[in-house]
Amino acid sequence: MGWTDDLRGRLDELLDGYRAALRGSLEGLDDEQARRSPVRSKTTVLGLVKHVTYVEAVWFDQAVTGRSYRENANLSKHLLLWSHSAARIEQSFE
């Protein structure tokens, strides 16, 4: 049996792995370190986690309610502010 025989299972496995890797990137970092940009683009580890948290929340909300992004009036409930602590953002990612 090849890995394509259970595409849903494989997709879940990949997403779990990517989420674990992203979560692991915050381990041992304090707020300042999580907000530090190690690259020229000013991307931060905390910014990536914040972005993925928002995208997942909106996607799941759309999948459950059937509403489009434009129709969803509650998008602000998924926003994480930059002023939120790394711990708060990481907790939301869980």
Image (cartoon, grey):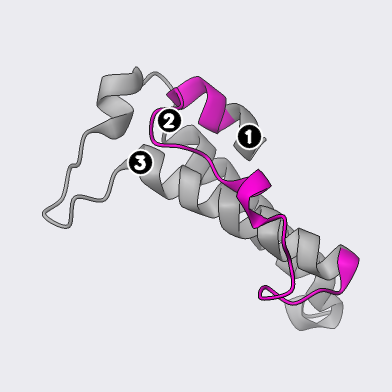
Position in image of residue 54 (x %, y %): 58, 52
Of callouts 3 and 1, the N-terminal one: 3
Label placed on residue 92: 1
Q: Are marks 3 and 1 in contact (CB under 8 Å)?
A: no
Position in image of residue 84 (x %, y %): 46, 27
At 34% from the left and 21% from the top, the residue drawn is 31
Which residue type does callout 1 highlight? Ser
Which residue type does callout 2 highlight? Leu
Which residue type does callout 3 highlight? Val
Q: Are marks 3 and 2 in contact (CB under 8 Å)?
A: yes
State the extent of the magenta-drawn residues as a range.
65-90
Position in image of residue 42 (x %, y %): 19, 50
| Crowding near the residue tagged with mark 1, few <14, some 14–19, many ≥20 C-alpha atoms within 10 Å | some
CA–CA distance between discs 3 and 1?
15 Å
Reply yes or no: does residue 32 show up in magenta.
no
CA–CA distance between discs 3 and 2?
7 Å
* Relative side of 19 to 58, left or right: left
Quadrant of the snapshot with the C terminus: top right
